[in-house]
Amino acid sequence: MVTYDDLESFLIRMDLDYEEVEEGICLVRSGTSGLPVVLHYDDTILLIRMKLIDLPDSLAAEKALYRTLLELNASEVVHGAYAIEGDELILSDTHELETLDFHELQASIESMELAASSHEHTIRRLAGVSSNKEEES
């Protein structure tokens, strides 16, 4: 069974910046997408969450967005899946602590980073949300 200390050791080995924001919850900062990843260590599972966007109140192209997300889940998101949590679009993955190892955690985080950076433009366009880069211009 992976302990919280083991989890911290994995993050250090991956050279990821992280901070424990409350007991059992880490905020991880990585380089690929620039989006923070939240790790929630519970008794038997590790929940991994990455917030992508706040969903707008009104989605003109809602069907196209949801269809695209489901297609990406089936074809391009190796670990985890796109999900809606409240009013936020997230990437989510869950692992049993009994069998979790370093390589599995690394693959999960890297897969989420790759999905976020690869799909961001398409998702934002379909949701009618401008990208951070566009807002800075």
Image (cartoon, helix red, strand yellow):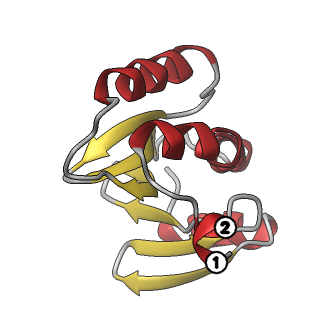
Residue at 31% in and 21% down: 63
Marker disc for residue 61: none
In the rendering, at what x and y percent does residue 47 appear? Answer: 40, 51
Q: Is residue 89 left or right of residue 37?
A: left
**SS at badge 1:** helix
Q: In which quarter of the image is residue 32?
A: bottom right
**SS at badge 2:** helix
In the rendering, at what x and y percent does residue 12 appear? Answer: 74, 73
Label 2: few (<14), some or many (≥20) within 10 Å?
A: few
Q: In this view, does 62 lie to the left or right of 69?
A: left
Q: How far apart are marks 1 and 2 (CA)?
A: 5 Å
In the rendering, at what x and y percent does residue 94 appear? Answer: 42, 41
Q: Which of 43 and 125 is in front in this view?
A: 125
Q: Where does the C terminus fall, quadrant-wise?
A: bottom right
Evaluate if marks 1 and 2 touch, with contact meaning CB atoms under 8 Å apart.
yes
Q: Quadrant of residue 49?
A: bottom left
Q: Is residue 111 above or below residue 54?
A: above
Residue at 51% in and 46% down: 124
Residue at 76% in and 67% down: 31
Q: In this view, does 136 lie to the left or right of 54?
A: right
Please give the residue where the numbered disc 1 appears in the rendered image: 136
Label 1: few (<14), some or many (≥20) within 10 Å?
A: few
In the rendering, at what x and y percent does residue 121 appear? Answer: 62, 44
Q: Check disc 2 and give the amino acid type.
A: Lys
Q: Which of 120 and 98 is in front in this view?
A: 120
Please give the residue where the numbered disc 2 appears in the rendered image: 133
Residue at 69% in and 48% down: 117
